[in-house]
Amino acid sequence: MSPDAKPGPRRWRPLALGLLAATAAAAIGTHEPATAALHKAAHRHAAAAPGCAGDNGGISLSPGFCATVFADDLGHVRHMAFGPGGVLYVNTWSGRYYGDGPVPAGGFLIALKDTTGRGKADQVARFGQTQAQGDAGGTGVAVYKGYVYAEANDKIVRYRIGPDGIPGGAPETVLSGMPLTGDHPMHPFIIDPEGRIFVDMGTATNACQPKNRQPGVPGANPCTEKETRGGTWLYDANRLGQVFSPAGRYASGIRNGEGYSFDSSGRLFVTQQGRDQLPQLWPKLYPDLKHATELPAEEVVLVTKGADYGWPECYYDQFQKKLVLAPEYGGDGGKKVSVCAHRTGPVAAFPGHWAPNDMTIYKARAFPAPYRGGMFIAFHGSWNRAPEPQEGYNVVYQPMANGHASGPYVIFARGFAGAHKDPGGADHRPSGLAVGPDGALYIADDQKGRIWKVTYRGPANLAAAASAPASGEQAAAAPPARAPEYSLPVPPGSSQAAVAAGERLFKASSCTGCHGPSGQGTPLGPDLAAGKWVWSNGSLAGIRRTIDTGVAMPRNYRSPMPPKGGAQLTNAQLSEIAAYVWAVGHQGK
């Protein structure tokens, strides 16, 4: 990003919105249990609540709330921030994290404005660096002292906001050199009124294993990765030309802190995405697969200087309500505590693998009293809960008091995924939250680039927060209907029965989390139906060998595949899954 780089277009233009059609209503739900959401195959989208115009953009909301589609088709929208004049600034992302898919024309940053008061952005302007200039966008975005600050590749840059609300000119580099390798290359951040930037450095690995995500491999001790990853770093928004270094670390032991927010007392909180694959990497220590799938909890922590929140040595067991020792560091499946007695636990906890991507503490007054002072949390949705149903893909409200959870959370918004809760099949995945000047809540989606505006239309004296009605979502365990098994080709030396058995195993395992319920691919794993074989010649024997040994260092995806996909497969089951994968890759050939 050189000083002489040409700025993107700086003009407002009308924004066309693609809206979904309304369908039938779903029944009213009650308090959401702490282990799972409702999974009832109803209609595709829940109808709007009484008093709402339209279908709430296809989602279901807590009673009394309504939504409009503020904007659509924006690209992979991540975080959002409001600036002067009610302009909403959005950061979008592309590249390897999204399968190197197509990128909208123009800059990755977007300014959006509703000049009519109808709840829809009628003006939009893209600005900032483009893909042609080497940019890939990012997650973090904030507004401070007349500038939009944004994550861009390994940097935090800023653009001066023009009189019309559209930032322009060449970017100024505030911070450079942030790490981009490994599992969590994103850098969400927040700026306080004094200009202190708190920025997340997500971990490169799942649990600091020298061989990432491989079964039975102890963690590095000491975990030198924590010198530059797995925590919150502190920098100054008023200074240009800062360079990332270990010296900037403010707090550690945070595996992937995506959502920052200050409460009314100025305390800083951040979400933490818990580690993955306890039963897949340590099956003897976690024989109860159903129970272990819920571990560890997703967390919200109170960020304080010098604190360590446990990663990688510890994880939070929400059933025991304590930090316990991870198996990579001598843990025994949940009993040993050891060094975890000296780590800092969360102020709120949620079911495992829901993937919190953003969080905002509601300090406005447009919503009724039960929704004030607590946290709205956007859960991106799981990929690795199989054979249990995939979960998340929602927005929850967590009541808070005195810096801690003060009651059970409720599912505030659901239905984003549509018919199928899985990374490859979901219609939408919540990724960002912002509160507007009028107190409305904005929810972003990084699957298709939609933003919803949520307002309250119910009684002023609402007694308590309540969950949204059940929508037409289905778990990924019930994949899309397609041609019966016998229509798939049979590999030489195998059988139709083996292909059918392999399909059942594939869909009941963690394979679907990366490759999709029918092998169609996701940002985490390739499309098996494409028939492009990177690690073998595509023969049945070659595919079997790849599944058996795993892929420790993938070329085109950010995370490795453990041997046997992390599942405990017999030789016969391994052959059956290989037969199914061969069949999927040879359809129509």
Image (spheres, helix red, strand yellow):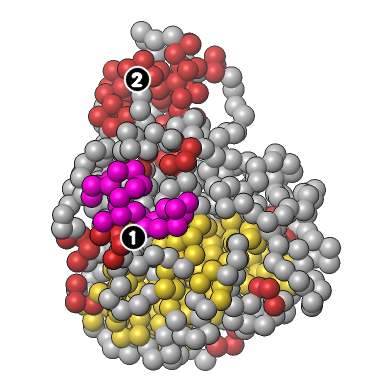
Residue drawn 71% across the image and 50% down it = 470
Q: Which x, y percent locates residue 94? A: 41, 58
Q: Position of residue 428 (x, y in %)?
A: 57, 53
Q: x, y percentage for residue 103?
A: 45, 58
The C terminus sits in image quarter: top left
Q: Secondary structure at mark 1?
A: loop
Sort mark 2 into few (<14), some (14-19) or many (20+) by Cα contacts within 10 Å. few
- Toward which corner of the image does residue 148 lie, by quadrant? bottom left
The label on residue 255 is: 1
* Residue at 52% across, 91% down: 163
Q: Where's residue 220, x and y in %?
A: 17, 52
Comparing 186 with 392, the one in front is 392
Magenta-tinted stretch: 315-338
Q: Residue at point 54% right, 52% down? A: 392
Q: Quadrant of residue 185?
A: bottom left
Judging depth in this view, the residue of 483 and 572 nearest the camera is: 572
Q: Quadrant of residue 546?
A: top left
**Mark 1 / mark 2, whichever is N-terminal:** 1
* Above or below, 236 relative to 394: below
Q: Which label number is shown at residue 570?
A: 2
How many residues crowd mark 1 within 10 Å: few (<14), some (14–19), many (20+)? many
